[in-house]
Image: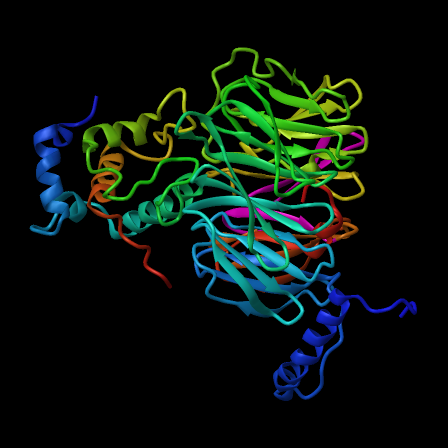
Amino acid sequence: MLSDNTSPINAGLWLCLAAGLVATPVAAQRAPMREQALIRMVRQDCGSCHGMHLTGGLGPALTPAALADKPVESLAATIFGGRPGTPMPPWKAMLSEAEATWIAQRLVAGFPQEARK
Amino acid sequence: MNGRPMNAMNRRSLLAAFAAIPLLQSGCASRSSPVVEGSGDLGVVVERARGTLAIINTSRREMVAEVTGLGDLSHASVVFSRDARFAYVFGRDGALSKIDVLQRRLVARVMQAGNSIGGAISADGTLVAAQNYTPGGVKVFDARTLELVADLPAEYAPGKLSRVVGLVDLPGRRFAYCLFDANAIWIADLSDVRNPKLTKLQNIGKSPYDALVTPNGRHYIAGLFGEDGLAMIDLWEPEPRVRRILDGYGRGQEPLPVYKMPHLRGWAVAGRYAYLPAIGRHEVLVVDTQSWLEVGRIAVAGQPVFVIARPDGRQIWVNFAVPDYDRVQVIDTPTQKVVATLTPGKAVLHMEFTPRGEAVWISSRDDNRVSVIDTGSLQTLAKLDIDAPSGIFFTSRAARMGF
């Protein structure tokens, strides 16, 4: 089961939050270093199938336009639990459910770039 | 000259050569003296985050130049012209770039697709083929000019294009490739480039993810993501047909997550045996290339991504998918045992042997480093600072079928 803050109503709220209208409580709770690690993981490791710019590859594109009709909740469930019958693996060994939700929200809003050294 | 009268073509090239002389002179003017060198010990390293190709020298173990502005090079791959002078770079964004590794510059570039995954070059060096996800299919270019000469959409049902993987060159101006979405292998014969002939093999197995041709050009083997087994074609048979090999290697066990797809090439073959990455199992599968039966399996540190034989076949080097990608393991082929586990850096993405295999170059993306390791002593010979390195490609690939 996913946590309460991924219900469809909240997912809509998260979209607004992620769009920059208000500061996001989840982002505030998460350590900046872990956030950077998650951003790097998505760009680099998810990027090996979805492309470093998330424009797609063997896996589908994960740009805001490509995800426009996808509920955050189902995106988070796919990230966390994988999609059986496709190459999409479950990432639950490397992520918490809340982190999967955070990634899904950021993908829908336009995923952040890595901070370059 | 052999004394024959010069034909029109020769006259034209001669005129073109004369016309180019002032250009060459001006190009050389800035240099103190023109350098005459071979390209046999050169190679390129993809700097995936910067859209840049580093040109390296494997004798001096150093970077000699960078060529920038090549677009999205995540998952970029490279093939070489048969004179080992030009590198053809297939970018994720669909760009095909031709780099002169001696003059260290971009000489031609086309945007040929929306999303591309790699390519191949024909044995005679005249045709460069790109395999594309969007639009799904193969496009074939004149290797000299990058002019499009054949478009082969992977249309497996009306209006439906499959993503293409596992493209290799075959003897006789042919290419073989897999249709990931259609469970098919197609062989394109371009001996008459205006009239490509396609041979289509259906139901080869579920979700072919990559493929290889053996170094003798005889067997084409596709890895299957959706099944425990691989699809194999004997190209020397009069009518090619698909055979399943290593059927049921997982024996019904629950597969482990595959965080990155393995890559297959003819480097898997060492002597009589082929060493292949299992899917969803932390194992390397050993196959006898005479009988095509499994003769062993070797437990390794993670999901194998590249399983590459040293050119002499004495060792097999293996790297892994996240989260085990800080390690590289070395298998000794006579004993079929892992004899060393190295940690050359964070996020090892690729390995490439020097032509005779005395050294291996290993890219560590997250350490911005390429390590050069002696394959005998396993000592590190050099470390090069290269930004987010991924694929490493040496010009010796020019002489190898399937590379």
Where, quadrant-wise, is the C terminus of chain B in this rendering?
top right
* In this rendering, position of residue B134 left or right of residue B251: left
Q: Is residue B262 above or below residue A22?
A: above
Q: Is residue B47 visible?
A: yes
| Magenta-span inclusion, residue B332 | yes
Where residue B172 appears, as percent x and y from the top left, is 74, 39
**Boundaries of the magenta span:** B326-354
Q: Residue at x 65, y 27 (%)?
A: B221
Q: Residue at x 13, y 34 (%)?
A: A11
- Viewer-proximal residue among B170 and A31: B170
- Viewer-proximal residue among B247 and A93: B247
* In this rendering, position of residue B285 left or right of residue B320: right
Residue projecting furthest to the top:
B252
- The image quadrant of residue B402 is top right
Q: Is residue B342 above or below residue B214?
A: below
Q: Is residue B362 visible?
A: no
